[in-house]
């Protein structure tokens, strides 16, 4: 009888038949007895994955899409500091690793930022002054505040009764900051200087697009880059604790993950606590909505979470923890503010 030679593809399909079990490890050649090789851990049963299984494996590799995610989030949210304590004590099998959890929630937060946007004061420039425009949207109305950074006493807001766009008058005053910035950028790169000059001549809508581009494109990287600094601050303020930098980094990953989680939830709810604080400062009570007041609750939760986690992980009195928290949060917020400004300026000088 003549035999028909199989094509390489047919041979490969036969090799990967639905359930193929080998008594010899395909990777290291060791004898195996069971589902996994005792020498290298390779699976002994070859199963061709379905499209759904392949997708789950792919997503699960980059995003913590597995059963213990829910348990990890429950502990993270309701027991500040416990994940860090358990991880450092070696109790890790029930939870997602700190880095993977951080990357998961950061991806979610940055995706929501791109989908829903973030209400932040947008820098404004003209030839002599620098300021900011803050537009706030709620289900009831939209309001805008224009601020001149040079002279805070000249801040002005003129809300309208129109439900679609409340406009405010912008006050301008001489300011050397823009001129100095152009000179500095010009000494570094002529292209940067031209892009900044081009930006200053654009209408406000185009300026806002450029600033938003810088924020969305570069700030996520800067926030991730600020994480090692957060751990460094912890190392410095707990210098006598004897803890290594890696332990502080685990705590930084967990607490910043919670910040990403709560920030994501706050973005899904109308209102803005920053707008609330600005309106209270300017006595513009008519521009405050109930949604803005509602945002105070998660914001307070965010503020109280960090000292509670610090107490559980590092111990110490309430007073000592409070002082350390104040130093830590001040330093970190300054880094975030600086990162925001740098991100927006990068968007300007690179794209005009």
Image: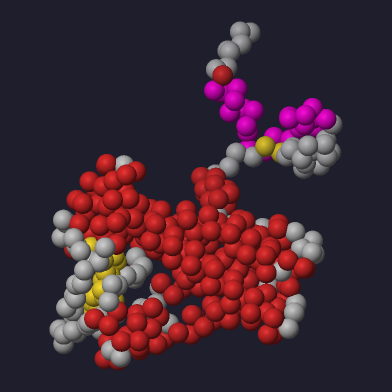
Residue 39 colored in magenta in the image? no
Residue at 26%, 73% in the rendered image: 148
Return the x and y of residue 153 as percentages of the image width and height.
27, 83
Residue in the foreground of this view, choosing between 3 and 212: 212
Q: Is residue 153 left or right of residue 6?
A: left
Asked where in the image residue 87 lies, by quadrant, the reply is: bottom right
Return the x and y of residue 188 as percentages of the image width and height.
34, 43
Residue at 59%, 25% in the rendered image: 12
Return the x and y of residue 302 as percentages of the image width and height.
54, 77
- Outermost residue, top direction? 2
Q: In this view, does 323 lie to the left or right of 104?
A: right
Residue in the foreground of this view, choosing between 279 and 13: 279
Is 297 rendered above or below residue 233? below
Q: Is residue 25 visible?
A: yes
* Tag count: 0
Residue at 34%, 65% in the rendered image: 117
Is 47 rendered above or below residue 170? above
Residue in the foreground of this view, choosing between 139 and 279: 279
Asked where in the image residue 20 lies, by quadrant, the reply is: top right
Is 127 rendered above or below residue 39? below
Q: Is residue 332 left or right of residue 179?
A: right
Residue at 55%, 79% in the rendered image: 303
Q: Is residue 206 visible?
A: no
Is 60 rendered above or below residue 112? above
| Residues rendered magenta in the picture | 9-30
Q: In this view, does 227 lie to the left or right of 147?
A: right
Residue 25 colored in magenta in the image? yes
Return the x and y of residue 246 as percentages of the image width and height.
71, 57
- Report the quarter where the N terminus lies: top right
């Amino acid at each position: 009888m003549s035999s028909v030679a199989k094509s390489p593809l047919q041979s490969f399909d036969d090799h990967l038949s639905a359930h193929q079990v080998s008594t010899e490890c395909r990777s290291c050649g060791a004898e195996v007895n069971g589902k996994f090789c005792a020498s290298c851990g390779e699976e002994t049963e070859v199963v061709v994955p379905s499209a759904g299984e392949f997708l789950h494996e792919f997503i699960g590799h980059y995003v913590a899409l597995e059963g213990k995610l829910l348990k990890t989030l429950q502990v993270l949210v309701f027991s500040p500091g416990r994940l860090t304590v358990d991880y450092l004590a070696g109790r890790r099998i029930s939870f997602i690793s700190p880095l993977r959890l951080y990357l998961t929630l950061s991806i979610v937060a940055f995706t929501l930022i791109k989908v829903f946007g973030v209400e932040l004061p947008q820098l404004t420039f003209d030839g002599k002054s620098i300021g900011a425009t803050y537009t706030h949207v709620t289900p009831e109305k939209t309001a805008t505040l224009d601020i001149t950074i040079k002279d805070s006493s000249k801040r002005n807001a003129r809300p309208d009764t129109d439900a679609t766009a409340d406009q405010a008058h912008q006050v301008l005053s001489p300011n050397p900051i823009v001129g100095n910035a152009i000179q500095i950028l010009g000494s570094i790169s002529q292209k940067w200087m031209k892009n900044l000059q081009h930006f200053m001549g654009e209408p406000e809508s185009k300026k806002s697009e450029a600033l938003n581009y810088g924020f969305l494109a570069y700030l996520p990287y800067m926030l991730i880059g600020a994480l090692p600094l957060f751990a460094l601050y912890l190392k410095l303020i707990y210098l006598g604790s004897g803890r290594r930098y890696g332990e502080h980094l685990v705590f930084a990953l967990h607490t910043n993950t919670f910040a990403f989680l709560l920030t994501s939830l706050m973005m899904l709810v109308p209102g803005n606590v920053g707008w609330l604080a600005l309106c209270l400062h300017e006595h513009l009570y008519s521009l405050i909505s109930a949604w803005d007041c509602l945002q105070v609750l998660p914001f307070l939760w965010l503020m109280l979470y960090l000292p509670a986690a610090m107490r559980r992980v590092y111990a110490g009195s309430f007073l000592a923890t409070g002082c350390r928290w104040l130093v830590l949060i001040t330093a970190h917020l300054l880094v975030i503010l600086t990162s925001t400004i740098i991100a927006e300026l990068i968007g300007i000088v690179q794209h005009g």
